[in-house]
Image (cartoon, coloured by chain):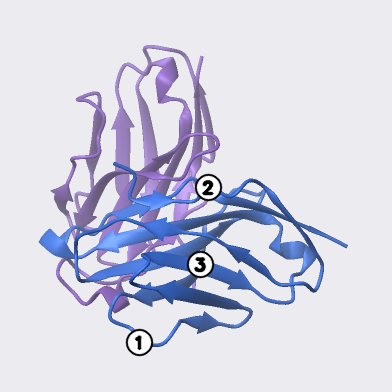
Chain colours: A purple, B blue
């Protein structure tokens, strides 16, 4: 079946502009995650949802970052007033299991990412 | 504090040889999961293999196997019979179960180049 999809794949924006990054998870997956990956580093957790509920947003770096998943499927990560330090690969992942479910069922599958460049 | 440590420099491996990628982790939880992902130059993150902390057997998945040494807190990935398509960055990650936190903590990755 179809994997996790993200759009746009590349986004170039000017400092101070707002950007919205979209994630479409694997059909039927309950949990959705956002990560950010700097060059030469592993992904770092930003936030995650079970269905439409945002369960953990402790990884969001500041209040310019927000995320929503209003119908429990597609999610949008929004960055307001972008800064150059926001430039990175933003990755979305989804997993089948809900919060508290056995760990064995909770493999996270990643989308291709959105490469954000802030000029 | 760094939860996942991957410190090997870039590795070159001959095609058809085996390669071991080191990963050590830090946790006080009794229940946790360890994952390995592959990131080729195209940028995708591809799930390879999973090991649960209570699993007594080392996980295997085709040419991938995980050498899990719980007392040493290490979860090394072994790729057997390397192929040119194995050239990629490999990330080790851990999920801790305590508190129901589903986040993955990743290491910085191991770069592997397979040479013919």
Label number found at residue B78:
none
Q: Circle 3 sits in a helix, a strand or a loop, which is it?
A: strand
Q: CA distance from mark 1 to mark 3?
A: 15 Å
Q: Is residue A70 left or right of residue B77?
A: left
Vertical relation: A15 (above or below) A43: above
Residue located beneath label 2 in the image: B7
Q: Circle 1 sits in a helix, a strand or a loop, which is it?
A: loop
Which one is in front, A98 or B78?
A: B78
Residue located beneath label 1 in the image: B56
Vertical relation: B18 (above or below) B28: below
Residue located beneath label 3 in the image: B76
Image x and y of residue A21, in percent: 39, 38
Residue positioned 49% across, 40% down in the render: A41
Residue positioned 24% across, 51% down in the render: A48
Q: Circle 2 sits in a helix, a strand or a loop, which is it?
A: loop
Image x and y of residue B64, in percent: 58, 76
The answer to which image quadrant residue B30 occupies is: bottom left
Q: Is residue B101 left or right of residue A12?
A: left
Q: CA distance from mark 2 to mark 3?
A: 12 Å
Residue positioned 30% across, 77% down in the render: A105
**Could one spot residue B91 in this view of the protein?**
yes
Q: Is residue A95 left or right of residue A114?
A: left
Q: CA distance from mark 1 to mark 2?
A: 26 Å
Q: Is residue A15 left or right of residue A57?
A: right
Q: Residue furthest front?
A: B72
Image x and y of residue A6, in percent: 46, 48
């Amino acid at each position: 079946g179809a994997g996790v999809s993200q759009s746009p794949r590349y986004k170039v924006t000017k400092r101070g502009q707002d950007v919205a990054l979209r994630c479409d998870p694997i059909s039927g997956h309950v949990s959705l995650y956002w990560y950010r990956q700097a060059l030469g580093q592993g992904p770092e957790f930003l936030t995650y949802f079970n269905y439409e509920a945002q369960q953990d947003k402790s990884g969001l770096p500041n209040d310019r970052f927000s995320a929503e998943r209003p119908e429990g499927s597609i999610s949008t990560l929004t960055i307001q007033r972008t800064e150059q330090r926001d430039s990175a690969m933003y990755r979305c992942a989804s997993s089948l299991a809900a919060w508290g479910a056995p760990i064995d069922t909770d493999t996270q599958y990643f989308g291709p990412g959105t490469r954000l460049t802030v000029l | 504090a760094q939860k996942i440590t991957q410190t090997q420099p870039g590795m070159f491996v001959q095609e058809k040889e085996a390669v071991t990628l080191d990963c050590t982790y830090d946790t006080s939880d009794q229940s946790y999961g360890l994952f390995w992902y592959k990131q080729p130059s195209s940028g995708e993150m591809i799930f390879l293999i999973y090991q649960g902390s209570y699993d007594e057997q080392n996980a295997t998945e085709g040419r991938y196997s995980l050498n899990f040494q719980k007392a040493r807190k290490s979860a090394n990935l072994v790729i057997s019979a390397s192929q040119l398509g194995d050239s990629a960055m490999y990330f080790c990650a851990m999920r801790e179960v305590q508190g129901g936190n589903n986040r993955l903590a990743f290491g910085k990755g191991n770069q592997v180049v397979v040479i013919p």
